[in-house]
């Protein structure tokens, strides 16, 4: 049984508020700054944001994407992260039965959104997120799906596959194609979602990564080497695996089982 519509609205509001905090995490964590102090200020003029400037999405629209004091543009990333977090929260709460599994999925969404944002900007996946993430995912698996065995196998498979690919790539190309951050991130995804979801995540991430890569190379008219942060694709792949992984596997298996 999933949540009733009035509660889904509440989950959406919660998602907006958490998304607002995730903006702070994405900005400050890679810079080694405190997540709680000082309060948010305009990056251009240093004016402290008023409470009314901190309402997710709405403030940005009301201010037309500009600081109230100096009119410097405020990145559309802020309302985007808030809106996307809220939308995914509602989708997950709608599709997941109420229980420890739902809480686990929402926690994983938080981690995936932050890892996406930080990998996008800095091409790093901080250990301070992925390593505790592996432990938290495993602890949740003791209370609900996918169960602790699938969780352990997921963490091992996630780390093993990407470590293997990274080692082969390094042996062939003599340069680092995949970072250890990706290895730990897929282990974390496996700890939360189990080993089957690791395979779905990896296939979706590689496929979408290849599509976007080809598109970017075509757009830049060849020659240019582009380093795409694979963690962003792992985030999107894991979200898809979480939301539609089971129907996807059933549909795919339908081609082979008469
Ligand atoms: Zn300003």
Image (tube, helix red, strand yellow):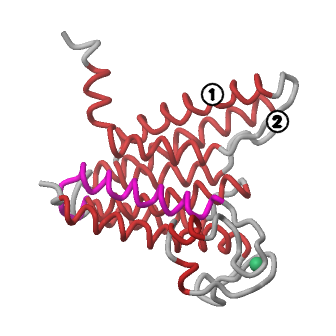
Residue found at x 81% / y 76%: 44
Residue found at x 22% / y 14%: 257
Q: If you read the primary sequence from the N terminus, does the residue marked by circle 2 or circle 1 appear first? A: 2
Q: Position of residue 68 (x, y in %)?
A: 69, 78
Residue found at x 19% / y 63%: 99
Cβ of mark 2 under 8 A from ligand 1: no
| Disc 2 secondary structure class | loop
| Disc 1 secondary structure class | helix
Considering only vertical position in the picture, is 218 above or below 225? Answer: above
Which residue in the structure is indicated by mark 2? 174
Tag 2 near tag 1, CB within 8 Å? no
Q: Position of residue 252 (x, y in %)?
A: 32, 21
- Please rate how many residues cluster around mark 2, counting C-alpha atoms within 10 Å: few if below 14, some from 14 to 19, many from 20: few
Considering only vertical position in the picture, is 221 above or below 201? Answer: above
Name which quarter of the figure residue 217 lies in: top right
- Please rate how many residues cluster around mark 1, counting C-alpha atoms within 10 Å: few if below 14, some from 14 to 19, many from 20: some
Nearest to the observer: residue 62 or residue 38: 62
Name which quarter of the figure residue 85 lies in: bottom left
Residue 89 falls within the magenta-colored stretch:
yes
Residue found at x 38% / y 61%: 137
Residue 193 falls within the magenta-colored stretch:
no
- Which mark is drawn over residue 210? 1
Tell whether 229 sits left or right of 92.
right
Considering only vertical position in the picture, is 20 above or below 45? Answer: above
Image quarter of the N terminus: bottom left
Q: Which residues are magenta?
A: 76-101
Cβ of mark 1 under 8 A from ligand 1: no
Tell whether 55 sits left or right of 45.
left
Q: Position of residue 235 (x, y in %)?
A: 52, 48
């Amino acid at each position: 049984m999933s949540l009733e519509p009035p509660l889904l609205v509440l989950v959406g509001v919660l998602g907006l508020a958490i998304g607002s905090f995730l903006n702070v995490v994405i900005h400050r964590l890679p810079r080694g700054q405190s997540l709680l102090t000082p309060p948010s200020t305009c990056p251009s003029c240093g004016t402290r944001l008023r409470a009314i400037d901190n309402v997710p999405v709405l403030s940005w629209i009301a201010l037309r994407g500009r600081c109230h004091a100096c009119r410097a543009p405020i990145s559309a990333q802020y309302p985007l992260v808030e809106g996307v977090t809220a939308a995914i929260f509602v989708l997950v709460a709608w599709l997941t039965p109420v229980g420890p599994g739902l809480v686990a999925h929402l926690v994983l969404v938080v981690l995936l959104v932050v890892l996406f944002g930080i990998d996008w900007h800095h091409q790093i996946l901080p250990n301070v997120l992925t390593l505790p993430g592996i432990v938290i995912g495993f602890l949740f698996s003791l209370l609900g799906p996918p169960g602790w065995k699938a969780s352990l196998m997921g963490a091992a498979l996630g780390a093993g596959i990407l470590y293997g690919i990274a080692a082969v790539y390094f042996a062939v190309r003599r340069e680092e194609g995949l970072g250890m951050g990706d290895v730990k991130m897929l282990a974390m995804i496996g700890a939360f979602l189990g080993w089957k979801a690791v395979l779905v995540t990896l296939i979706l991430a590689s496929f979408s990564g290849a599509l976007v890569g080809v598109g970017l190379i075509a757009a830049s008219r060849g020659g240019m080497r582009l380093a795409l942060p694979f963690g962003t694709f792992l985030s999107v792949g894991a979200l898809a695996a979480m939301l539609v992984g089971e129907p996807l596997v059933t549909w795919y298996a339908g081609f082979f089982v008469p």
